[in-house]
Image (tube, rainbow, N blue to C red):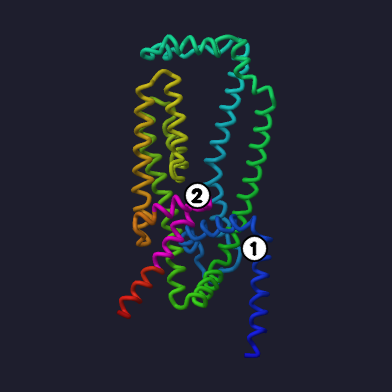
Amino acid sequence: MSNNPEAKARLIGVIILLLLGGWVLHSFLPLLAWAVVLAITTWPIYQRLLIRKELHGKVTWGAVMLTLLMGTIILAPLGYGLSRLLDEAQSLGQFLTDAQHIGIPPPEWLESLPMIGAWAKQSWINALGSAEAAKTALHWLGTGGAVSYTKDFASQLFNRFISFLMILLLLLFVYQHGDSLARQVLACSRKVFGEVGARYTLHATAAVRATVNGMVLVGLGKGLLMGVGYAFAGLSQPAILGALTGIFAMIPFAAKLIFGVCSLVLIAKGHIAAAAGLFTYGMVLTLIADNYVRPALIGGAVRLPFLWTLLGIFGGMETFGLLGLFLGPTLMAVLMSIWRDWIDDINKSA
């Protein structure tokens, strides 16, 4: 009994230290979570690269090469997309400059709209057809709003780049000490949850790996199918557009940004039927992939029911953002394991 006050004081001290540590590191915890997700997903690849067991815990060429490869895979398409965005921004700037001198003529297809074609064309001319009207409509660009938005965008882009470099550094650390970290996590799980704690940890690991695999497979498949759709719609460079769609498709419903913009481009060129067909095709693919294929791939790997997989994906995104794509299904998988164990204990005691 005399040890109780001392044990309580020690417990309170540990809790206070944990809270202080979490407060100090709270801005880095999402970066650490991303590094852990990437490490869990690519750990089998790293194990194949690390041939000799005595190299564990040391900086190896395998860890460095795999870290650089992960950075290249993620940064290369994003860098290409950013360069294209900058090119388009320059073209847009030139277009707006010309518009303030000569106005913006209405597109040819506008007059062909049934019933409202003539009215739509005249409204366009009144709003944008002359230099004065275009200057009035685009006056907000001269107020500094666009400049402020550009500075904010550049600042956010720089911060995200620094965060990504930090993730790569943490990923290299996890590769180095992955085995010892795994043993410590399993030991803590057994200490907290008993012998089933190790099984819960393994289920969580499998859920993370299955979620990433499901995202990648769905993204690749959707990018390939949408690339075919872009080719049939008559868009130039369908392979590049398909690759960008595949990257965005790894995030549920984000691919709509790509084929939605492509549909608007087709409308601007007067190809309304092709635009409607492309948008409908993309929406059908998105609904099937994100609501049926992706949950089936993720849930099937960890024995997680379809509904709970779907709720884990969307609930995780709503709560944690993009990181919730992986944390949501992982949490659902652990909860489902606890639920099954509880049901088994009830059946055995009955």
Q: Is residue 342 left or right of residue 89?
A: left
Kind of element beneath mark 2? helix
Density class for disc 2 (Cα within 10 Å; few <14, some 14-19, many ≥20) is: some
Q: Which residues fall within the magenta stretch?
A: 310-337
Q: Name the amino acid, label 1.
A: Gly
- Of callouts 1 and 2, which one flags the residue occurring earlier in the amino acid sequence? 1
- Residue denoted by label 1: 22
Q: Identify the image quadrant of residue 35.
A: bottom right
- Residue denoted by label 2: 318
Residue that appears at 37% across and 12% down? 115
Alpha-carbon distance for marks 1 and 2? Answer: 22 Å
Q: Is residue 217 left or right of residue 144?
A: left
Residue that appears at 64% across and 55% down? 27
Residue placed most toward the observer, 322 or 88: 322
In x, y percent, where is residue 50? 51, 64
Residue that appears at 43% across and 14% down? 110
Q: Is residue 31 left or right of residue 283?
A: right
Q: Are marks 1 and 2 in contact (CB under 8 Å)?
A: no
Q: Name the amino acid, label 2.
A: Glu
1 or 2: mark nearer the eye = 2
